[in-house]
Image: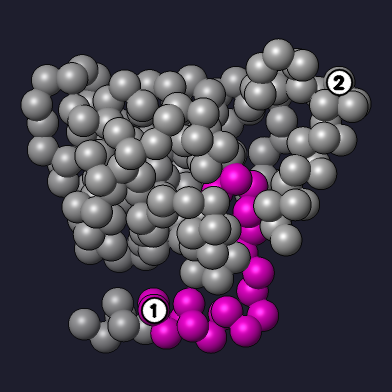
Amino acid sequence: MTDNINRIKIIRNVVSGLYSATTPEKVQPAPNNVRDKVGCVAIGSDHGGFEVKEIIRDYLRTIGYRVTDVGTSSKDSVDYPDFALKVAKKVASGECERGIMIDGAGIGSSMVCNKVKGIRAALCYSLKTIINSREHNNANVLTLGGPLHSPDELREMVKLWLETTFAGGRHWKRVNKIMAVERNQ
């Protein structure tokens, strides 16, 4: 159902002239997620996700987000934990409201980010997992396997993740239990 709602929104935007008929990217910047107050996004990658990070960083800026790029700055071999930690710390400190970390599969980065107090990192691989991570788990860091998706898929995924709000309600109890585990360990 959510996919149909998103398709309807895209069709409305095409009709209203917000999208170019030849490209899926917006011609003018989209509003940020105001409800969750997402204005700044920390982004990082290892060497395997470097090219994708550059694409996503530039895309996020074109649609109106402030982006703090914590590196890496080339395809030279680096260790993903170093950059995942930087992303997580930017979010945990409140300097950025959300974070995105990209490596070869997204698995290791998710593990690292979730070691930082206050972080709820989610490895997502589809639009369905993107929505679930936000609506149900209030994820504040997204980890992705950059080489596993096309640039267009990744742009769609990060935009949807940033625009999806936490549903609250019955999910609060579960998110609070996640955070209680962190406090009690």
Secondary structure of residue under mark 1: helix
The x, y position of residue 121, in whole percent, is 37, 58
The tag on residue 178 is 1
Query: Residue 173 lies in magenta, yes or no?
Result: yes
Residue type, mark 2 in image = Gly
Query: Residue 43 lies in magenta, yes or no?
Result: no
Q: Is residue 94 visible?
A: no
Q: Nearer the viewer, residue 76 or 67?
A: 76
In the rendered view of the protein, which quadrant contains the N terminus?
Answer: bottom right
Name the magenta segment's main secondary structure: helix
Residue at point 66% right, 24% down?
A: 24
Residue type, mark 1 in image = Ile
Name which of mark 1 and mark 2 comes first in the sequence: 2
Dot 1: within a 10 Å radius of its alpha carbon, few (fewer than 14), some, or many (20 or more) residues? Answer: some
The x, y position of residue 60, in whole percent, is 54, 28
The x, y position of residue 22, in whole percent, is 71, 13
Quarter of the image for residue 7 reads: top right
Q: Which residues are magenta?
A: 160-179
The tag on residue 17 is 2
Residue at point 48% right, 77% down?
A: 175
| Separation (CA) of disc 1 from disc 2 | 43 Å
- In this rendering, would 120 be left or right of 127? left
* Above or below: residue 22 compared with residue 29: above
The x, y position of residue 170, in whole percent, is 62, 84
Secondary structure of residue under mark 2: loop
* Above or below: residue 158 compared with residue 53: below
* Above or below: residue 160 compared with residue 114: above
Dot 2: within a 10 Å radius of its alpha carbon, few (fewer than 14), some, or many (20 or more) residues? Answer: few
